[in-house]
Image (tube, grey):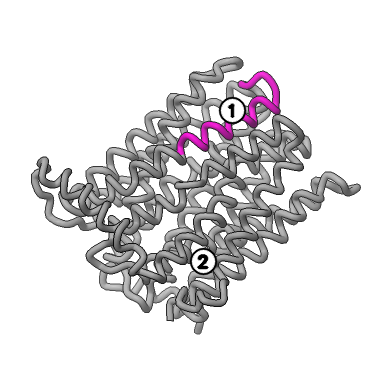
Amino acid sequence: MGFANYMSIFKLRNRKEVFSWSLYDFANQPFTTIIVTFIYSAFFVKVIAENEQEGTFLWSMAIAITAIVVSLLSPILGALADRGGYRKFFLITSTWICAIFSILLYFPNVGDVYYALSFFIIANIAFEMGGVFCNSYLPDLSSSDNVGRISGYAWGVGFVGGLLALFLSFFLFDINNPDEIRKINILVGVWFLLFSIPTFLFVKDRKRERLNKQHISSSFESIAETFRSIAHYRKIYRFLIARLFFNDGLITIFALGGVYAVGTLSFSFEEVMMLGIVLNICAAAGSFLFGYIEDKIGANKVINISLIVLIIATFMAYYAPETNHPKELFWVAGVLLGLMVGPNQSCSRSLMSRLTPKEKQNEFFGFFALTGKATSFLGPLSFGIITKLYSQQLALWVVIILLIIGFVLFNRPDDSAINDK
């Protein structure tokens, strides 16, 4: 009966629109899975960069630069989309930029460090901006009764996309051949272009207005007003502060998980690929399952569960090199991380949707991205610096500390207001 209730999203009147919107996660997930987390990040550190320590540091800098740029752009473009009705225009533009520069990552080879980083930074910024506008459609497509299921469904579909792209890469390319690994970037770009088309065609948008100076000036006024009034939205304010920390921990895991496996635990590219496949299966399962559970127990409880498990799993990953079976323990940690990453992100998105006033959708989701990125350069930056000075293993404490701080802030005694009931 529970599964039937979860599958009720297919009985929605707007199910075609919900499915088309969910396909955007299906389209863009391979970028995160293959380029950011598992394959290309490890390839950059292992092959393109001079050595693993320097490569880890430079890759961390690229993630930090992305975070800073997105934190500055997202609230401005979010407000501009609200005022000018250009949400879909920005979504399409960012998608094409990300896809094209993902394809360009095929060209940098051994030693082409700054070409590779430049292409990656542009692609990653465009990817993150696309997520801002895609997320802002969620309140339009859902109600308080089904927002968790719809959000969880989309995350689950996204992880299925990442999984299928990994499988396809595994069978089409020789993972032990650097030239073959570079070709995977072309697959990621083409995949994004192809599977994002239904979102552009079938997800409805507000009527477009002609963009003018008044829209731009009113966008900045709207941002300033939101800064002044954000304290009045107490639930949102407290949630975003907590998320600022635990999301930073997740971003660091995404950016450097494959790098840690290769550099500290001596994973081969084939082993990293298999790790990515297994983690995406777990992530998809976790997203689908907890999307249903969220609507039963509430997003805040699911977020707490996910944070506790993520902290435990990161401790295991840190301790793994000290054991007689480091890879096996890291695999267990990876499975736990995979199961909880999807629910944490999905429930954060749906909780934000529940708390956000309808008239502030794009603008507040711009701030959702802002708080997700405002300090998110600190995690990767700290990880890179500690790795350069000491080791990747010691640098993993950055993730543990960020997750713990986020958990504590999310559960402050006076934060009973952070709930969706």
Q: Which amino acid does label 2 sit on?
A: Phe
Q: In this view, does 343 lie above or below 317?
A: below
Q: In this view, does 16 lie to the left or right of 350?
A: left
- Give the percent coordinates (x, y) of residue 122: 41, 31
Point out residue 219 in the picture as x, y percentages from the top left corner: 20, 49
**For residue 341, side relative to residue 129 (left or right):** right
Residue placed most toward the observer, 366 or 16: 366
Task: Name the main secondary structure of what is drawn in magenta.
Answer: helix
Specify the farthest residue to the front.
228
The C terminus sits in image quarter: bottom left
Q: In which quarter of the image is residue 267?
A: top right
Residue of label 2: 288
Residue at 37%, 38% in the rendered image: 126
Q: What stretch is highlighted in magenta?
A: 48-66
Q: In this view, does 56 lie above or below 366?
A: above
Position in image of residue 312 (x %, y %): 72, 61
Residue sitting at x 30%, y 51%: 199
Residue 148 occupies quadrant: bottom left
Q: Residue type at mark 1?
A: Leu
Q: Residue 152: tell me if it is visible.
A: no
How far apart are labels 2 and 1 at the CA level? 35 Å
The residue beneath circle 1 is: 58
Mark 2 or mark 1: name the one nearer the start of the chain. Answer: 1
- At mark 2, the secondary structure is helix
Name of the residue lying farthest toward the right: 324
